[in-house]
Image: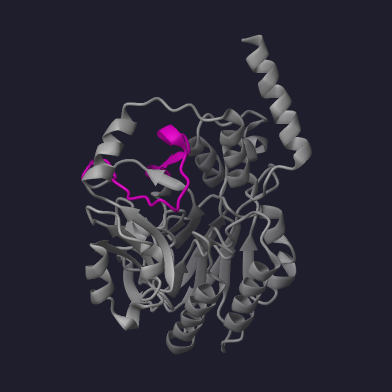
């Protein structure tokens, strides 16, 4: 069984102030090109299709075009999709029954009642069945209906409650498609699993959304989404494939690839081939004095997204305007010299009190994908004023 494992498309995302539609269309076209050339038995997308729960019309168009072109590859390739934490389960589930008749299988909502189960897609090859279990992103509150109305005590307990009901046959090959933050200990070495995260990800403070990796022990391969850097989570068959594109400056040093997974006979280890990707524009860091950076700029990389750190001891005149002569997509221009380092040392000793309304507004925007309305803002302002008055 050969399948593509991809995740975290984040269609509609912006990189700083740049719209990434053209970049995303380009990289998705390369995935389609690989599908036409290699013809996998399935394409698995492990969540975060969109960057916001209410995607823009442009974002929906990009994904619709991708599905349309991918499903046009003949013979038809089954496409398996789950919702991530950035997606709206209801919106992603729309028309899922109709799409299923065209071998596009979408799981937006986690099981919520005793009658609900994970969507299970069974494909066959020369070795027999391969069962793909589609488990969308979930929180403990989503699955309380499976636990007698009681809230599971942790994310691990919530995921375990969902999986235990599936009666997974250990004699068959089983694949889980999941979008959670898995941690724990390597079953072979006993060592704590160390996972790398990026600035473009939003993870809970204190790790309250962690899921212990032991809940996946019954699966021959775990196709995971959520982390933007490709990495294995404790063993070769439990993997985050990472994003197709770099979505933050912290990812500049990463090599983005398309994971091509091969499952042989039951008991054989999964083989993962990393197919190279060729983005329309790279994300790079450049560091040095202004004149050195300008003189060393490669015209072939003019259109890359560039984060610039200037080390001139004397601040240069209008540095961004000068840099724009050699780079068309500048993300940021920072100064790192003796003066700025001294300022940072001074600032670290200060206590900064953020406006609670600003903090909540940022949180609301991240969670809901939109700004608060004027009415909502006024309600919050009234609440905070009352709290201050009571203090």
Q: Give coordinates of residue 256: x percent, y percent.
A: 36, 69
The quadrant in which residue 316 appears is bottom left
Q: Position of residue 126 (x, y in %)?
A: 43, 79
Question: Does residue 313 appear to the left or right of 126 in the view shown?
Answer: left
Q: Indicate the quadrant containing the N terminus: top left, top right, bottom left or bottom right.
A: bottom left
Q: Residue furthest top?
A: 391
Residue 294 visible from this viewpoint = yes
The image shows residue 211, relative to residue 60, as above or below, that is above
Q: Nearer the viewer, residue 314 or 347?
A: 314
Residue plotted at (71% across, 54% down): 90
Q: Residue furthest right?
A: 375
The number of numbered badges drawn on the structure is 0
Give the answer, above or below, for where 358 lies relative to 315: above
Colour scheme of the picture: one colour
Q: Main secondary structure of the magenta part?
A: loop
Residue 211, by quadrant, is top left
Q: Is residue 237 magenta?
A: no
| Residue shown at the point (24%, 69%) measured from the top left | 291
Question: Which is more toward the observer, 357 or 272?
Answer: 357
Residues drawn in magenta: 189-215
In front of the other: 270 or 241: 241
Position of residue 303 measured from the top left corner of the image (x, y, whole percent): 41, 77
Residue 15 located left or right of residue 89: left
User: Camera-side residue: 182 or 159?
Assistant: 182
Quarter-wise, where is residue 52 in the image? bottom right
Can residue 262 be seen from the camera position used here? no
Task: Give the image location of residue 210, x and y in percent.
Answer: 44, 39
State the quadrant of the C terminus: top right
């Amino acid at each position: 069984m050969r399948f593509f494992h991809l995740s975290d498309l984040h269609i509609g995302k912006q990189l700083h102030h740049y719209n990434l539609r053209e970049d995303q269309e380009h990289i998705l076209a390369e995935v389609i090109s690989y599908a036409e050339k290699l013809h996998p038995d399935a394409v698995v997308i492990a969540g975060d299709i969109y960057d916001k729960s209410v995607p823009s019309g442009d974002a929906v168009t990009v994904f619709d075009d991708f599905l349309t072109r991918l499903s046009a590859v003949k013979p038809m390739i089954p496409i398996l999709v789950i919702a991530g934490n950035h997606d709206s389960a209801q919106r992603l589930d729309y028309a899922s029954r109709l799409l299923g008749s065209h071998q596009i299988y979408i799981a937006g909502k986690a099981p919520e009642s005793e009658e609900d189960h994970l969507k299970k897609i069974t494909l066959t090859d020369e070795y027999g069945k391969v069962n793909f279990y589609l488990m969308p992103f979930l929180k403990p509150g989503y699955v309380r209906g499976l636990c007698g109305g009681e809230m599971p005590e942790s994310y691990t307990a919530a995921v375990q409650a969902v999986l235990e009901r599936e009666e997974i046959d250990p004699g068959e090959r089983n694949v889980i498609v999941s979008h959670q933050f898995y941690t724990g200990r390597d079953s072979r070495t006993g060592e704590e699993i160390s996972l790398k995260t990026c600035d473009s990800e939003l993870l809970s403070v204190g790790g309250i959304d962690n899921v212990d990796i032991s809940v996946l022990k019954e699966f021959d391969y775990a196709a995971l989404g959520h982390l933007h850097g490709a990495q294995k989570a404790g063993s070769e068959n439990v993997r985050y494939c990472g994003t197709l594109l770099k979505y933050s400056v912290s990812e500049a040093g990463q090599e983005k690839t398309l994971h091509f997974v091969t499952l042989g006979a039951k008991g054989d280890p999964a083989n993962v081939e990393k197919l190279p990707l060729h983005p329309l524009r790279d994300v790079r860091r450049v560091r040095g004095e202004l004149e050195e950076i300008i003189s060393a700029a490669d015209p072939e990389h003019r259109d890359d997204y560039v984060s610039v750190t200037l080390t001139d001891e004397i601040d240069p005149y209008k540095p961004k305007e000068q840099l724009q002569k050699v780079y068309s997509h500048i993300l940021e221009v920072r100064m790192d010299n003796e003066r700025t380092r001294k300022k940072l040392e001074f600032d670290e000793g200060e206590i900064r009190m953020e406006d609670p309304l600003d903090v909540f507004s940022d949180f609301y925007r991240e969670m809901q994908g939109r700004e608060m309305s004027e009415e909502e803002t006024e309600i919050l302002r009234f609440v905070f004023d009352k709290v201050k008055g009571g203090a």
